[in-house]
Image (cartoon, helix red, strand yellow):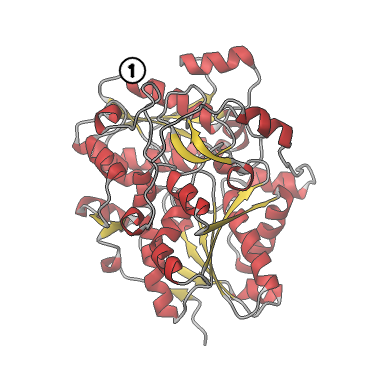
């Protein structure tokens, strides 16, 4: 009988995170201070992050040891399975082999706890009492709530308002783990008030929620901000996903032809694919594909420029693919992919043609998700369904290829989205070029280049 699950043992959990910067033949662009417009130095971030994470953010070391305390928490759900989707292959009538790295088995149901646990640990170690963050669909907010509960920290989450109402059970999960959840934009911060003054019915965006969370965090001496995607140290922590996948593919006797992941801010895509980038640089036939929504197409329609990560211009300027920091996407049901920018490292690799990008429609991803649920049983998160949709398209147009995708989260708390899809209430969004051009006009001009 053919094996369909490839499992590692707890002793095989990676001992160190992999830093892709060490193996890149081209240097990343430095983050820029929003006030001075000069390259950032570690002290500039001290009010926002603990020093241990700031050092990881700027590190060029290839391997960064994972503390044993973090590995002990990882053992709750790691290593995660690598599964072969043989029933899906049969339904697609494809000769390709489709594998899924199943990150949905974590307590929060997604890949997000890989960095949440690490960030909570380092903040606790440096005496921080409270973490503040934002969340789109709620995956990150629930992951940080879980991690703060583990280490005895207080947690406040600014949740994008449209998702706050679309996904009530994500709030329930955060509340169970002791977090406070605020719909964003809110009246609790000056940046939230500014947005509501301009648009009282604003559905919110990750850029707005980031502004609120950062503003909240810097007001308190014992609080720090925690980010679930985009920054280097976040993607670093997520490389446990790709490192495990490499070992599991050896067990399966496979070498990947395609690596596919959904992409919003870049954390699951980077964590899954970065351990393979060195292989990609040697083997041009290996294809790495990042999949985004047509409603928020930063990689496929954005510009590669320095831009703010938030709407209030509080964050450092990062060189990334962006739609403009004032861009507010429509309320699609993949809330975790509704971000105007992209992780600088993912952006750099896309600019250098190491990572490809495609955009898919909302109705197509739900159609793919339902087929997957009917064949393989698990209901994917709408974000994850983007990767599935692209993987199915690849399987239909190729023969005898090994396709590996990151199954970044389950959709059991997104069932209202499926209800609306099945009732015919959803529609596709292709964000108008004129609106993107309008948002692009606000991108700051930065003369300093690496």
User: In the current view of this chain or complex, which residue is farthest to the top?
Assistant: 197
Query: In the displayed structure, does residue 177 sit left or right of residue 399?
Result: left
Q: Residues within 10 Å of mark 1 (few under 14, many from 20)?
A: few
Note whether 315 is above or below 242 in the view shown: above
Closer to the camera in the image, 358 or 70: 358
Q: Nearer the viewer, residue 195 or 436?
A: 436
Q: Position of residue 160 (x, y in %)?
A: 55, 31
Residue placed most toward the observer, 220 or 262: 262
Does residue 341 show up? yes
Total numbered circles: 1
Apparent side of residue 107 relative to residue 172 in the rendered image (left or right): left
What percent of the width, then of the height, locates residue 25?
37, 58
**Which quarter of the figure has residue 68?**
bottom left
Which residue is identified by label 1?
A: 219
Can see residue 137? no
Is residue 3 depicted above or below 53 in this figure? below
- Name the residue: 47% across, 14% down: 190
Residue in the image at 62% along x and 36% along y: 166
How far from the left and from the top, in percent, is residue 140? 45, 41
Which of 445/141 is in front? 445
Q: Kindly indicate the quadrant of the structure image that contains residue 258.
A: bottom right
Mark 1 lies on a secondary structure that is loop
Residue 404: x %, y % from top left: 52, 68
Relative to 254, residue 129 above or below = above
């Amino acid at each position: 009988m053919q094996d369909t699950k490839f499992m590692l043992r707890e002793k095989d959990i990676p001992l160190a995170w992999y830093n892709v910067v060490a193996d890149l033949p081209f240097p990343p662009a430095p983050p820029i201070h929003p006030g001075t417009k000069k390259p950032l130095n570690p002290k500039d971030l001290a009010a926002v992050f603990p020093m241990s994470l700031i050092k990881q953010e700027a590190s060029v070391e290839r391997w960064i040891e994972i503390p044993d305390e973090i590995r002990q928490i990882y053992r709750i759900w790691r290593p995660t399975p690598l599964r072969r989707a043989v029933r899906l292959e049969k339904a697609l009538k494809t000769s390709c082999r489709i594998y899924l790295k199943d990150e949905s088995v974590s307590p929060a149901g997604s890949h997000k706890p890989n960095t949440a646990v690490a960030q909570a640990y380092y903040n606790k170690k440096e005496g921080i009492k409270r973490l503040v963050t934002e969340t789109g669909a709620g995956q990150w907010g629930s992951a940080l709530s879980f991690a703060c509960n583990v280490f005895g920290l207080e947690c406040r989450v600014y949740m994008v308002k449209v998702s706050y109402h679309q996904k009530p059970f994500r709030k329930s999960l955060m509340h169970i783990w002791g977090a406070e959840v605020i719909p964003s934009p809110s009246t609790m911060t000056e940046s939230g008030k500014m947005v509501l003054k301009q648009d009282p019915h604003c559905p919110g965006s990750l850029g707005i929620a980031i502004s609120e969370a950062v503003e909240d965090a810097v007001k308190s001496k014992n609080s720090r901000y925690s980010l679930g995607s985009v920054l280097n140290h976040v993607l670093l922590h997520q490389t446990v996903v790709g490192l495990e996948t490499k070992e599991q593919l050896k067990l399966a006797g496979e070498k990947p032809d395609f690596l596919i992941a959904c992409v919003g801010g870049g954390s699951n895509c980077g964590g899954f694919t970065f351990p393979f980038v060195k292989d990609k640089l040697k083997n041009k036939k290996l294809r790495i594909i990042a999949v985004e929504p047509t409603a928020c197409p930063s990689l496929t329609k954005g510009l590669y420029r320095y831009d703010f990560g938030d709407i209030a211009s509080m964050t450092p300027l990062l060189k990334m693919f962006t739609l403009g920091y004032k861009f507010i996407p429509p309320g699609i049901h993949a809330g975790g992919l509704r971000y105007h920018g992209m992780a600088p490292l993912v952006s750099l690799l896309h600019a250098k043609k190491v990572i490809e990008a495609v955009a898919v429609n909302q109705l197509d991803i739900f159609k793919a998700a339902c087929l997957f649920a009917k064949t393989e049983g698990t209901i994917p998160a709408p974000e994850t369904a983007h990767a599935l949709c692209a993987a199915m398209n690849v399987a239909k147009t190729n023969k005898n290829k090994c396709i590996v995708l990151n199954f970044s989260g389950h959709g059991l708390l997104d069932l209202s989205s499926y209800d609306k899809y099945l009732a015919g209430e959803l529609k596709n969004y292709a964000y108008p070029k004129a609106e993107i051009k309008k948002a692009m006009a606000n991108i700051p001009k930065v003369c300093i280049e690496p």
